[in-house]
Structure formats: C-alpha cells, structure tokens
C-alpha cells in the first residue's frame, strides 16, 4: 500500500482555468484534492468541466457561486462551513465579495485530467 501525504505549498502550484490560485494537495487513482484561493473583489471565469465532478468546502472569505445545469440555475452564498457539489457538465462561476480572500478545498472525481478538462462558459458576472 502506498500512503499519500502532502503539505500545502506557500505559493500556488498553478492558476486554474477559472483564474483562481491552486495549491495541489493529495491525489489518488480515484480523486484529487486542491486548495483554491480567489483574491478579494475578484471574479472567476465561468467554466464547465467535461468529465469530472467536484465537491467544495469553503474555508475562508465570503462570496457567491453560480451553478447552471440543464434548465436549472442558482446562486448560493459562500462562507466558511459551506459545502457544495458541482456535477459533471455543470456551468459555474464564483466571486469573492469580501475584503478577505475566498478559500476552499475541493475534491475532483476522477482526478483532474489536464488543461483540456475545462472550457469557458457564459456566466452571470
């Protein structure tokens, strides 16, 4: 058995397709985990994933998340303690409305396959 352990990096490992900072956490064959950070006042690009689902848990900051799938759409408030799901094919966009960065941990299932996974979408902001 290979045990996987990783400490969060001081600096971002990458910039996500939506424009947020990404710090990679652990990954397995079944899922990958990352920490996302969006600066105060920033708005992500609206995107849609081709083949992965995500679950998010908000750690810090305040903002909003827009999700759209089929004929349904909603905007939810983001604050520490909120968790949410982004099913495969869901269009989504998020923003940081406070003066503290919006930070969340997300698990991607299956693991993030690469840059071609996300494509830009039209969002509300």
Image (tube, grey):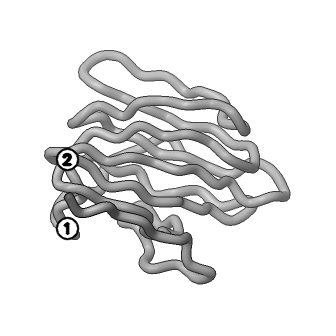
State the image quarter where residue 55 is shown.
Answer: top left
Give the labeled residue for mark 2: 30
Picture coordinates of residue 119 (x, y %)?
Answer: 24, 57
Q: Residue at x 42, y 61 (%)?
A: 18
Q: Evaluate whether residue 118 shows in this view.
A: no
Q: Residue at x 50, y 34 (%)?
A: 66
- Figure check: 33 above or below 64: below
Residue 38 in the figure: left or right of residue 113: right
Q: Residue at x 52, y 60 (%)?
A: 35
Picture coordinates of residue 60 (x, y %)?
Answer: 73, 49
Residue 3 in the figure: left or right of residue 111: right
* Disc 1 crowd, CA 10 A, few/some/many (<14, 14-19, 20+): few
In space, the residues marked 1 and 2 are separated at their CA atoms by 15 Å
Picture coordinates of residue 54 (x, y %)?
Answer: 35, 41
Picture coordinates of residue 92 (x, y %)?
Answer: 41, 41
Q: Residue at x 22, y 69 (%)?
A: 115
- Figure check: 29 above or below 56: below
Quarter of the picture containing the N terminus is bottom left
Give the labeled residue for mark 1: 114
Closer to the camera in the image, 100 or 113: 113
- Figure check: 10 above or below 94: below
* Disc 2 crowd, CA 10 A, few/some/many (<14, 14-19, 20+): few
Q: Which disc, if any, is residue 26?
A: none
Q: Secondary structure at mark 1?
A: loop
Residue ranking furthest to the right: 99
Question: Which of the two marks, 1 or 2, is nearer to us in this view?
Answer: 2
Residue 90 in the figure: left or right of residue 113: right
Q: Secondary structure at mark 2?
A: loop
């Amino acid at each position: 058995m290979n045990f996987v352990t990783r400490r969060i990096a001081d600096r971002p490992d990458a910039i996500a397709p939506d424009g947020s900072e990404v710090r990679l956490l652990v990954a397995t064959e079944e899922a990958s985990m990352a920490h996302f950070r969006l600066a105060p006042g920033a708005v992500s690009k609206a995107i849609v994933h081709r083949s992965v689902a995500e679950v998010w848990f908000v750690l810090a900051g305040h903002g909003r998340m827009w999700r759209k799938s089929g004929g349904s759409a909603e905007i939810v408030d983001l604050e520490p303690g909120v968790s949410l799901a982004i099913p495969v094919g869901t269009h989504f966009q998020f923003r940081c409305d406070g003066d503290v960065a919006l930070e969340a941990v997300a698990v991607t299932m299956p693991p993030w396959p690469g840059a071609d996974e996300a494509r830009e979408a039209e969002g509300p902001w």
